[in-house]
Amino acid sequence: MNDREAELISRCQRGDQDALKGIFDQYHKKVYRIAYGVVRHREDALDVVQEVFIKLFRSIKDFKGKSAFYTYLYRLTMNTAIDHSRKAKRALFFSLDEEGSFQPSDAQEKRPDHIAAQKELEEKVRWAIDQLPQDQKATLIYREIEELSYQEIAGAMGCSIGTVMSRLHYGRKKLQDLLKDIVKGREGQ
């Protein structure tokens, strides 16, 4: 934690709303990406962001600094997003990027037939990710989207590093099994 962040947290713990704005400015994009990865709808993700920062302001006095602040915030975000999804009774989806699509890497891949194939692949990947248990899905979001270390993920999820590694292993294995026909089909092209 840098000095500026520590000062903002301290001020926020004393009820300073300007300090909360500073924390918001620093973290709102990351909070949005996590929320979007869970709820997969822009408006819902924005609702989650708002709710996270309201909860943060109410609960920040409980933050003791035993873990990194962003770990605390990510855990709050993930829990809020999951709760939001449950309330809305929507299926949880994993987004590969903020817009929810793969990005073509060269001009050839921008041809209509390639774009259609990419969209089909994207839908199959989303379907496969949706089949994962929530803990594996959340762990993959932390690792693949937020690029957190195993230790940071363990702190955010309140589990051991071994559990994180296990969830990643089994989540990736299940995805591989679910998508094996797709992978074989693409190798034949």
Image (spheres, grey):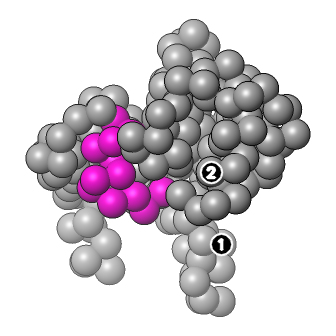
Q: Mark 2 packing: few (<14 Cα in 10 Å), some, or many (20+)?
A: few
Q: Mark 2 near mark 1, Cβ–Cβ under 8 Å?
A: no
User: Disc 1 on helix, strand or loop?
Assistant: helix
- The residue drawn where x is 68% and y is 30% is 13
Q: Nearer the viewer, residue 11 or 39?
A: 11
CA–CA distance between discs 2 and 1?
Answer: 50 Å
Q: Where is mark 1, residue-wise?
A: 112
State the mark number for residue 179.
none
Q: Position of residue 171 (x, y in %)?
A: 22, 45
Side (left or right) of 10 relative to 156? right
- The residue drawn where x is 65% and y is 89% is 107
Side (left or right) of 166 relative to 52? left
Q: Position of residue 186 (x, y in %)?
A: 31, 72
Q: Is residue 112 visible?
A: yes
Q: Where is mark 2, residue-wise?
A: 6
Q: Nearer the viewer, residue 138 or 179?
A: 138
Q: Is residue 155 magenta?
A: yes
Q: Magenta region: which residues? A: 146-157
- The residue drawn where x is 57% and y is 10% is 87
**Is the stretch drawn in magenta largely helix, strand or loop?**
helix
Quadrant of image for the C terminus = bottom left
- The residue drawn where x is 57% and y is 83% is 105
The type of residue carrying mark 1 is Pro
Q: Is residue 55 magenta?
A: no
Question: Which mark sits nearer the N-terminus, 2 or 1?
Answer: 2
Q: Nearer the viewer, residue 175 or 146?
A: 146
The type of residue carrying mark 2 is Ala
Residue 62 in the image: above or below residue 184: above
Q: Nearer the viewer, residue 39 or 28?
A: 28
